Image: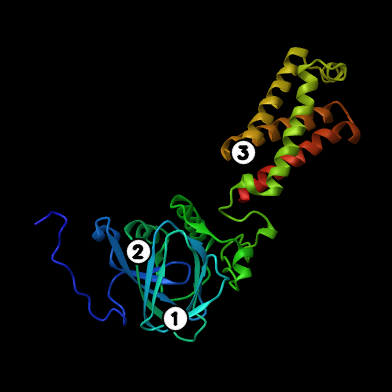
Amino acid sequence: MHPLTSSGEIIHGVTEGTSRIVLDVLGPTVEFLTSPAAAHDDFCVMRGVIPPGVAVPLHSHDATEVFFVLSGTKQVLTLGSEPAEWVEVRAGDYVHVPRGTRHAHRNVSGEPLIELVITTARLGNWFEEVGTPDTGTRRPPTPDVLANFLAVSRKFGYWLGSPEENAAVGIRLPEVTGSGSPGHLSRSRGPVPGRPLGEVPMFVAVSLLLAAACLLPAAGKLLGHPKMRQSAARFGIRWRHYRLIGAAELAAATGILFGLWWHPLGLAAAAGMALLLFGAVITHRRAADGGKEMAPALLALAIAVAYLAIALSS
């Protein structure tokens, strides 16, 4: 007998439920009848449940999925060349969703939808990583659960529809609970967790502003502008040391721009620039400068703080 060959398995009463671990996947639940490990790179099988009033938002993945409804009813939406239309399926119906197809499910009835879900072992691994042990109580996902869901989905190349795309087909995304909860997920209310910061217009704008706030004084110092030499003399800083500040500003601008693609570098550059600007404000105060002289440093510091706030909150 081949080492991966088993004698098979019989599970009774699948519709009523089994004694296996049930995973909550942001509302719907699954329990493995054939787990990814037991599938040996073949297909895996799950018992899936969509409670009344729960939807599976628009998504797609590189795995084919097959659904066989055991009890209850649900509506299925697949996006292709035909106009989008919700189709109701019920016990005994079979649904085939090819890989890469954008689709969604929802249960608008008053009874749970119970079905068999048949897919690849790889997509089964996705369910294992995003699912949390079911407590039997429906509640909105916490920020940590949602963050893990989005991170794992990105790792698996799992496309997720935006709040606007889901709203267009009649799906309202869930709320998030916990401290600092942003309420309903909406791109119009700031960066959405999981959306690349380099694609968030506000973050890009603040990054460019902060880079400019670093480059302008850096150019003056490095090129030896007369006003910069006067400032160095007034602050009692040797010129060669003052030029080093310009080099630090130039490095910060470079880090912030590259931070649009590699965020840790941008964060480090912005944090360093914020400390440098804080020191500049203190230097102005010691020189008894007024608000006019301090304004550029204060404005640049405010932009740096805004950058850090957006990056860290996302």
* Helix, strand or loop under label 2: strand
Which residue is at the far bottom? 110
Which residue is at the far front? 81
**Residue depicted at 28% across the width and 78% down the height:** 14
Residue 176, compared with residue 90, is above or below; it is above
Q: Which mark is residue 119?
A: 2
User: Looking at the picture, how far across and down is residue 302, in whole percent?
Assistant: 76, 41
The answer to which quarter of the image holds residue 266 is top right
Q: Which residue is mark 1?
A: 89
Mark 3: few, some, or many residues within 10 Å (few <14, many ≥20)?
Answer: many
Q: Amino acid at mark 2?
A: Thr
Q: Are marks 1 and 2 in contact (CB under 8 Å)?
A: no
Residue 54, compared with residue 312, is above or below; it is below
Residue 78, compared with residue 192, is above or below; it is below
Single out the mark in the foreground, 3 or 2: 2
Q: Amino acid at mark 1?
A: Val
Dot 1 or dot 2: first in sequence order is 1
